[in-house]
Image (cartoon, rainbow, N blue to C red):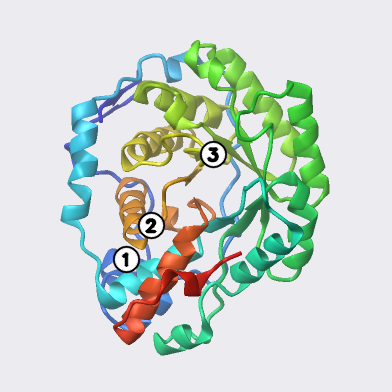
Amino acid sequence: MTTTSKSQRVTPSARPRTEAPAPAAASTPSALLTGAPAAIAAALPATAGAHGHARNPGVPYDSSWFDDIRVNLSAAERRVATLPGRRSVKKDAQAAWLLKAISCIDLTTLSGDDTTERVKRLCAKAITPVRQDLLDAIGFGDRQLHTGAICVYHRYVATAVEALDGSGIPVAAVSTGFPAGLIPHDLKLKEIEASVRDGASEIDIVITREHVLTGNWKALYAEMQDFRAACGDAHVKAILATGELKTLRNVAKASMICMMAGADFIKTSTGKEATNATLLVSLIMLRMIRDYQERTGYKVGYKPAGGVSAAKDILNYQILMKEELGREWLEPDLFRIGASSLLADIERQLEHHVTGRYSAFHRHAIG
């Protein structure tokens, strides 16, 4: 991908740049990608889900930040196509990366047949995402491990908050008329405020896709500002529904505008679109995050959601995050994964790592 703005040109054929300072030795790629239980233990932060950086306050609307954005499709496709072949993570190293991924999962249930008991079971799985015998076998038994958050509809926020009390796991609520986002604007703000009152500390909002498709960028900016204000201290993730935005250029512009309006995270999808998270869309969004950080100094998180269900897939996302944005974006305060079945597949892979045998998928139910 080549994105061009008045202040920056990014060429994908060049070696990806990282603005973050060099991490400590135990957090370097060589430490994460070497085969030893110590490397596995070093792969996870002491606590997951705490936001340890200055929150993005947003900036005044300025169309010059995105008017000249262009996407070089062939270069972007080439960049992501070569990713799996250039990085191979196996054995203890793979276990380390997968444990890291668990700490970044927003464990999600967003079905029409959700029940209070299902949400409670999901919360129990978030607190204990991997069987203790597997953690003991890989030298991780004395470390705390839980998912990055639980993500539910507003109806179940209070249930999740109660079930997770004392665990340190935040509750995220989808809001603003999820998934279509077509309810009246005042009702969107009331829904956000109701979820925050019930205890949600993260709000996943959906933008109005019409604003993007018609080029009404000021309306998108104003809408996002209102959502941010309604969230108060709760962090806000802006769902772009990239599969419905038609072009990668629209994805890039919508990403930048939502960050300018104060989004703490930008997120690919609701999980309900025909096309959800892809590495190609992720590359475009990550380049916008990098551009925004270079302009403002503020770090914005990223959340792929929908279609990320296999352990081998999340490894590619993690590697892309590390190469494009740096080591800090492997932590749950800047990287989340919207998923449900992904956790079961990761646990299966960890069991194979320990026993040499693959477990049946139904033995790892999450809800």
Residue at (57%, 35%) from the top-left corner? 238
Does residue 19 sit above or below 224 in this rendering? below
> Label 1 sits on what residue type?
Thr
Q: Is residue 26 visible?
A: no
Task: Give the image location of residue 280, x and y in percent.
Answer: 31, 37
Task: Give the image location of residue 98, x and y in percent.
Answer: 39, 67
Residue carrying label 1 = 28
Does residue 252 sit above or below 164 in this rendering? above
Task: Using the numbered discs, state the Cα–Cα distance from disc 3 to disc 2 in whole angstroms.
Answer: 26 Å
Label number found at residue 51: none
> Label 2 sits on what residue type?
Arg
* Comes first in the chain, label 1 or label 2: 1
Residue carrying label 2 = 327
* Comes first in the chain, label 3 or label 2: 3
Q: Is residue 187 visible?
A: yes
Residue carrying label 3 = 270
**Marks 1 and 2 in Cβ contact (< 8 Å):** yes
Task: Using the numbered discs, state the Cα–Cα distance from disc 3 to disc 1 in whole angstroms.
Answer: 33 Å
Q: Foreground residue, 235 or 268?
A: 268
